[in-house]
Amino acid sequence: MYSYFKGIVTEIESNNITIECQGVGYKIFVPNPFSYEINQEYKVYVYNKISEDEHTLFGFKIKEEYELFLKLISVKGLGPKLALPIIATGSIGGIVDAINRENILYLTKFPKIGEKLARQIILDLKNKINLEGPVEEDNNSVEELMSVLESLGYKLSEIKKVVPLVNPSETLENQVKEALKLLLK
């Protein structure tokens, strides 16, 4: 089993990156591939899923994302291909908070997560996730804000103009309010 790869990113695709380590290119599915840059070195924490017909690598920039991913895939009915979009579109703190507060509405906003699976996530993980150390949420909170604005019907071109003007230290609710004010000007 692999713990992490440290190497140069040589390719970026819509849902994965290729990282070259010691002359070998590894295709790794990651939550946000466009947060990587080609020809830059990264340490990527990996989970190796082995099944009858495939070997798949899932990777994460920070250890807290990796640990949350491992917790999520331990839930009955939630595999790696469902857990990856949760981490890609939610913030670590937001996901953990939603689980601990039994916020089904928050959990069902993720792709292919229905009410039944959201209840199973809460049942299996409530008060069992202890992530210590620094948790990087800046990119995730920006993506979360963009996702909310997009769901409200705004065009991506409009959203990209106002998101940099929004204070990232505010709560998501206040960020949305601030962005909406800017969009209505």
Image (cartoon, rainbow, N blue to C red):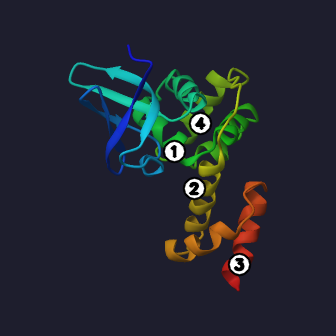
Q: Earlier in the sequence, mark 4 or mark 1?
A: 1
Mark 1 or mark 2, earlier in chain: 1
Of circles 4 and 1, which is in front? 1
Please give the residue where the numbered disc 4 appears in the rendered image: 118
> What is the quadrant of residue 136 in the picture?
top right
Q: Badge 3 local density, few (<14 within 10 Å), some, or many (20+)?
A: some
Where does residue 141 sit, x and y in percent of width and height?
Answer: 65, 52
**Label 4: which secondary element:** helix
Callout 4 crowding tier (Cα within 10 Å): few <14, some 14–19, many ≥20: many
Residue at the location (68% across, 26% down)?
A: 131
Residue type pointed to by label 4? Ala
Q: 163 or 83: which is nearer to us?
A: 163
Tell me if residue 150 comes above or below residue 117 in the rendering: below
Residue contact at pointers 4 and 1, CB within 8 angstroms:
no
Distance between the Cα atoms at labels 1 and 2?
Answer: 8 Å
Q: Residues within 10 Å of mark 1 (few under 14, many from 20)?
A: some
Of callouts 3 and 2, which one flags the residue occurring earlier in the amino acid sequence?
2
The amino acid marked with disc number 2 is Glu
Q: What is the residue that sits farthest to the top in this orientation?
A: 1
Q: Decide which of tag 4 and tag 3 comes sooner along the chain.
A: 4
Look at mark 1 in the image and give the residue it sits on: 88
**In this rendering, position of residue 25 left or right of residue 141:** left
Indicate the amino acid at tag 3: Leu
Real-space Cα separation, disc 3 to disc 2, in angstroms: 17 Å
> What's the CA distance linking mark 4 and mark 3?
34 Å
Which residue is label 3 attached to?
Answer: 182
